Amino acid sequence: MNIHNKIKMLVIDHDEYLKSIKNIFDDIADMLTSTSGEESLVILENNKIDVIILNNITSDLDAIHILHYLKLNNDLSNIPIIVLNDNMNDDFVKKCLYAGATEFIRKPFVNSLLKNRVNRLLDYEELKKSLHHHISEEHNLIHENVKRSKILLKEMAAALSKTIDAKDRYTSGHSERVAEYSHMIASCAKLNKSDINKIYYMALLHDIGKIGVPSRIINSQSKLTPQEFNLIKSHTIIGASILQGIDIFPELAIGAHYHHERFDGKGYPQGLKGETIPVLARLIGVADAYDAMTSQRSYRNALAQDYVYDEIKKNLGRQFDPDFGSIMLDLIEEDKDYQLCESNSKEKLDQRTT
Ligand SMILES: [Fe+2]
């Protein structure tokens, strides 16, 4: 308790006690007094009270009524209350405790004991306030750090995806577009919020393993030899090994590892089939194929939207998960102006990842 700031004390008791209680606390408290329960409730509404000394029986309300009133009032429920009574039977004490009393003192009381109890209560309240303040500061700090970590993750992932795409002169922006399409499919599929948030980053980094594949093979304009194609395929394994160290986000490695598996089991690297392929990897597979077909490659121009639609439809249940593939078809049908592949604007990316 700060001795320079007097506390505000409300004493609700019979006249005969008010004067002696006032004398006990004169040096530490500005005191408000009342002999009536109703009147004391009005005082409580209009003053910021630090501690209450309450006699069991006032002229109108008993202590239990007053305690109930305080407990039900959010602004008043934390005020410590010492109940004074000349009869401390178990039933009364239980009722008062249940109704919110903090301490009991039997009448007639010893002055020093009453003062000591009030001081202890005030110290306890001070400690509680400082603890709350400390917890609230820690909470704000954690909140701020989480916010900063999210921004860092977003910016690091974007920087990494640009590094991947920079290796392939024909697929600039591929990772961001696949992330965008994956997010759209996940939202339409009504996946849970956590998966919808994760899918963006999983898709953004799905091709990170290309960092380990020679640029001359990635950018080759001639037909790849089987050995060269095997090197391209190895980007899934390389990507998974790069990302598997991120324990806090294990799905990142899953997206990189399995996005080239096919629903019919003819994909790579493991030839997994149907629902044995992780669900979010199946989803990225659809978005990845859509972007691959609608982008210009080293060996061909971007394909027409109608052709892409037919290819996806033909391959539902073969290359593609039928549910996610169907959602992609719906998105293409809605995209009358063929704007979908232009949908990786900075503003949209920001909206998706906040
Ligand atoms: Fe890939």
Image: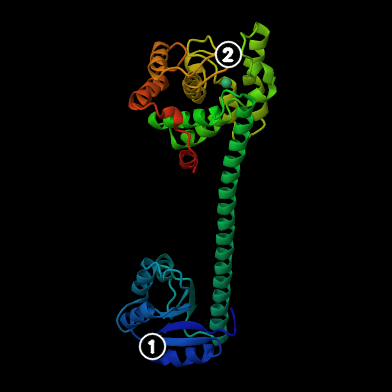
- Above or below: residue 190 compared with residue 95: above
Query: Which residue corresponds to the image point at 64% horizontal and 20% vertical from the top-left?
Result: 235
Image x and y of residue 113, in percent: 56, 82
Q: Is residue 248 visible?
A: no
| Residue type highlighted by circle 1 | His
Residue 94 in which image quadrant: bottom left
**Residue picked out by circle 1:** 14
| Residue type highlighted by circle 2 | Tyr
Q: Is residue 219 visible?
A: yes
- Above or below: residue 347 compared with residue 332: below
Residue 330 in which image quadrant: top left
Q: Secondary structure at mark 1?
A: loop
Image x and y of residue 120, in percent: 58, 76
Question: Which residue is at the far top?
Answer: 226
State whether label 2 is within 8 Å of ligand 1.
no
**Residue picked out by circle 2:** 268
Query: Which residue corresponds to the image point at 58% horizontal and 30% vertical from the top-left?
Result: 205
Residue at mark 2 to residue at mark 1: CA–CA distance: 88 Å
Q: Secondary structure at mark 2?
A: loop
Residue 315 in which image quadrant: top left
Q: Earlier in the sequence, mark 2 or mark 1?
A: 1
Q: Residues within 10 Å of mark 1 (few under 14, many from 20)?
A: some
Image x and y of residue 184, in percent: 42, 31
Closest to the camera, between mark 2 and mark 1, is: 2
238 displayed left or right of 55: right
Count the labels in the image: 2
Query: Which residue corresponds to the image point at 59% horizontal and 41% vertical from the top-left?
Result: 155
- Colour scheme of the picture: rainbow
- Above or below: residue 152 compared with residue 237: below
